[in-house]
Image (cartoon, rainbow, N blue to C red):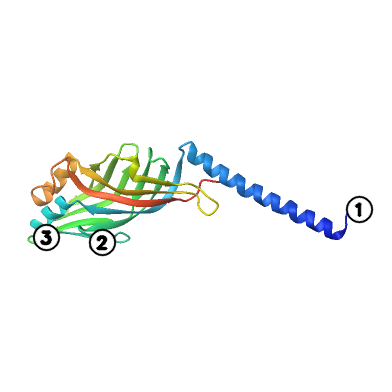
Amino acid sequence: MLMSFEEGSLMRRRTVAIAAIAAVSTAVVSVSVAVAVGAEVPVNGAVMWCLSPAAAKQLETIGVTMSAAAPATLDSSGATPCVRLPMKGKISLDASSGNGTFDGSISFTQSADGRSLRLTQASGDLTARKVYADVGVDDEPSRTVNLTTYTLDMRNITVIPPSLSSAGAVEGKPFDTLLTDSGAVAFARAFGAPPVPSGDSLATIEGRVDVASVLG
C-alpha cells in the first residue's frame, strides 16, 4: 500500500522527533553517569571569603584593613568584611576530590605604619581540605603557604543534578577555614601576631560552582 504525501510527511516528522528525544536523553544520561561515578568535572563560579568575627575584631583593633584587587571584589555590607573571588577548576560533585584556583588578590594593611600582607594565587585542594596562597609581607618576595585547613560537613553542600537546561552545580553554605601554623607565622611577621590563634577560624567560605562541560 502506498502512503499519501501527508502520511509520509507525518512519519518523517515523527522520526525526527524521536531522534531528537533520543539524542537529548543520551546527553542527560551521559551527564548523570559522570556525576554518579564521582568523576572530576570542570567547574567555574565564585566564592565569598569572609573574615570570622574574631579575626575581624582583632584586625580592627590593631588598625588593619582588608582590601581586594580585581577580579576579586570587597564586600563590606555584612557583619564582617568579605571578598568575592571568581573560581575555576575540576571537582567531583560529591565534593570529595578536586582543586580550584581563585582569581584576584586580598591585602591587609596597617594604617599606623603601612605594613602589609598580600594573598595572591590562592587555590583550594578539596582532597586534602587545604587552602593555599602566595603570601607576601611588605616588599618581600611572596612564597606559597598552606594558609588554612577545613573539614566539610556534607549537610552544608547542595548538589544540583544535571538536567536538560543545566549540566549541574554545587552550592556550599558557609564553613570555617582554620588558620594553620604557617599562616599564623605569616600574619605575625606582618603585624606582630596572627588575628586568631592557629587552629581557630580565620574566615568562612561559601559559594557556588557550575559544571562547565562533561561531554565531548
The residue pinned by badge 2 equals 74
Q: How packed is label 1: few (under 14 Cα within 10 Å), some, or many (20 or more)?
A: few
Eye-nearest disc, 3 or 2: 2
Q: Position of residue 22 (x, y in %)?
A: 66, 47
Query: CB of mark 3 within 8 Å of CB of mark 2?
Result: no
The residue under the point 31% across, 40% down is 153
Which is nearer the N-term, disc 3 or disc 2?
2
Mark 1 to mark 3: distance in Å? Answer: 90 Å
The residue under the point 26% across, 61% down is 74
Inspect the image, locate mark 2, and give the three-letter code of the amino acid beneath it: Leu
Eye-nearest disc, 2 or 1: 1
In-front residue for pair 68/7:
7
Mark 3 to mark 2: distance in Å? Answer: 19 Å
Q: Position of residue 198 (x, y in %)?
A: 15, 41
Q: Secondary structure at mark 3?
A: loop
The residue under the point 25% across, 48% down is 134
Q: Position of residue 143 (x, y in %)?
A: 23, 46
Q: Position of residue 67 (x, y in %)?
A: 21, 60
Task: Name the side, left or right, on which 5 lies relative to 123.
Answer: right
Which residue, as the protein is rendered here, is positioned at the far right? 1
Inspect the image, locate mark 3, and give the three-letter code of the amino acid beneath it: Gly
Quarter assignment of residue 129: top left
Circle on res. 2: 1
Q: Is residue 4 visible?
A: yes
Which is nearer the N-term, disc 2 or disc 1?
1
Task: Name the side, left or right, on which 137 lies relative to 7.
Answer: left
Circle on res. 114: 3
Quarter assignment of residue 147: top left
